[in-house]
Image: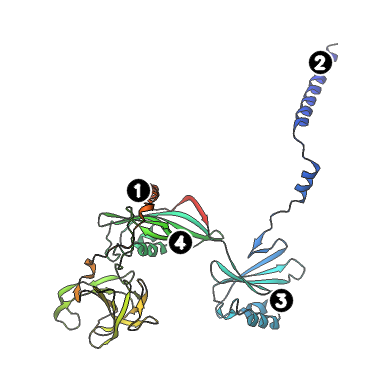
Amino acid sequence: MFLFSRSVSWRLVLAFLLSSVFFIWSCQPRKSQHQIAEEVAKPTEPVLLYDINIDSLTVENGTVKRNEFMSDILLDRGIDYALIDQLARQQRTVFDVRKIRAGNNYAFLRANDSVQTPLYFVYEIDNTDYVVFALNDSTPARRGHKEVVRSVEEARGVIKSSLWNAMVDGNYDPNLANKLSEVYAWTIDFFGIQKGDNFTAFYEHLYVDGKPIGIGRVLAARFEHADQDQYAFFYVQDSVGDYFDEKGQSLMRTFLKAPLKYSRISSGFSNARFHPVLKIYRPHHGIDYAAPAGTPVYAIGDGVVTRKGYQKGGGGNYLYIKHNGTYTTAYMHLKGYAKGIASGVRVKQGQLIGYVGSTGLATGPHLDFRFFRNGNAVNPLTVESPPAKPVDSANLTQYSAFVQGWMQKLNAADSLALQPKTADSIQKQ
């Protein structure tokens, strides 16, 4: 009797559990036949490469070798020479195959069949642009552009020798030094930065296929130079972006601080300098920037070329630019001039005008740069340049809030951290 009762009780418990499970399951919402059919029919996301569905293709990657042409690459893969010639001639308006460069990447997209028939040849023009050649029909070649991801990252460092070396020491892209020098070109003389100067910058790091390809815009920066903080914020108003300080004043000035990048001052402004060639003391009313021959020289402001020529035994190849009724600048010992530079030509601020050389009376390659106010030579390093247009008064309230957000990040306590940090903001180009 005892065994029979225990058996009956277990059966009752099991029946109760099964009925409970069935009840719960029956209460769940049911998918209709139409919903089930839609799920089955829903296509899977195709795998795209160069905007081509490669689900049923195989990919062969390669790199252009030295002295290798597109015809060499295609012939090695069994492509008929007549087709190669046709591609070269008929698709020249899309891409001139003679411009293929060693070191650039390419890819063959092949059919997944027994002979691996090549269907497309893709040549990567640079990090973002490519051209696709169809190898199996008369489809014209086309250009494409890879997606560029902009990651907002942070860089912080202290100057020990140069801004460039500070970037290297902090494991940042050294090209960020170029970007910062361009942002502060009107307000900081980078030939005069000192040991102990420090910086913080938020900038766009560009990525393609998960690999870094370069630096985009500097979005906000703080540069402490000579115990003074210099701020820079990229702000867009009236659809135009520019750099402003924390008060809304433009960082752009009438004149650049220097006519060339990354050099050193070898001789300053003086009324009695010992001349290294003539071995006498005489005035040197300019600044000598020592730099390798061929270093680009830029106009420090808008103006008109008034004089261009050669001074034997003196300034060598020289150039004078009149900026307005008050200021004129001179550039001497040039190796040569930029294309189109001639007397009477109007130039823009930052425009390439020539190259550092050692023509005339010079012991080595350098630029002798001179600044004239009302015809009188003045020290270029002491010239105060007025700012360009500030933030519009109607935008100042919005700009102030914009700046405060960046200031909190720029002035964070860990100002000596040297590893890049990725911010939350990621934008796609």
The correct choice, above or below, for 381 with respect to 88 in the image is above
Whole-number angstrom distance, CA of label 2 to CA of label 4: 78 Å
Q: Are marks 3 and 2 in contact (CB under 8 Å)?
A: no
Question: Which sits earlier in the primary sequence, circle 2 or circle 4?
Answer: 2
Q: Can the viewer see residue 368?
A: no
Dot in front, 2 or 1: 1
Tell me the number on the disc at residue 6: 2
- Residue extending farthest front: 394
Sooner in the amino-acid sequence: mark 3 or mark 2: 2
Label 2 element class: helix
Residue 304: x %, y % from top left: 32, 78
Q: Tag on residue 138?
A: 3
* Disc 3 residue crowd, few under 14, some 14–19, many 20+, Cα 10 Å: few
Q: Earlier in the sequence, mark 3 or mark 4?
A: 3
Q: Do the CB atoms of the residues marked 2 and 4 lie less than 8 Å apart?
A: no
Q: How is the image coloured?
A: rainbow
Q: Nearer the viewer, residue 40 or 306?
A: 306
Look at discs 1 and 3 and give the one toward the viewer.
3
On the image, numbered disc 4 is attached to which residue? 216
Check if mark 1's residue and mark 3's residue have beta carbons within 8 Å.
Answer: no
Q: Amino acid at mark 1?
A: Asn
Q: Nearer the viewer, residue 56 or 142?
A: 142
Left or right of 157? Residue 127 is: right
Sequence-earlier tag: 2 or 1: 2
Please tell me whether mark 1 sits on a helix, a strand or a loop. loop
- Numbered badge on residue 411: 1
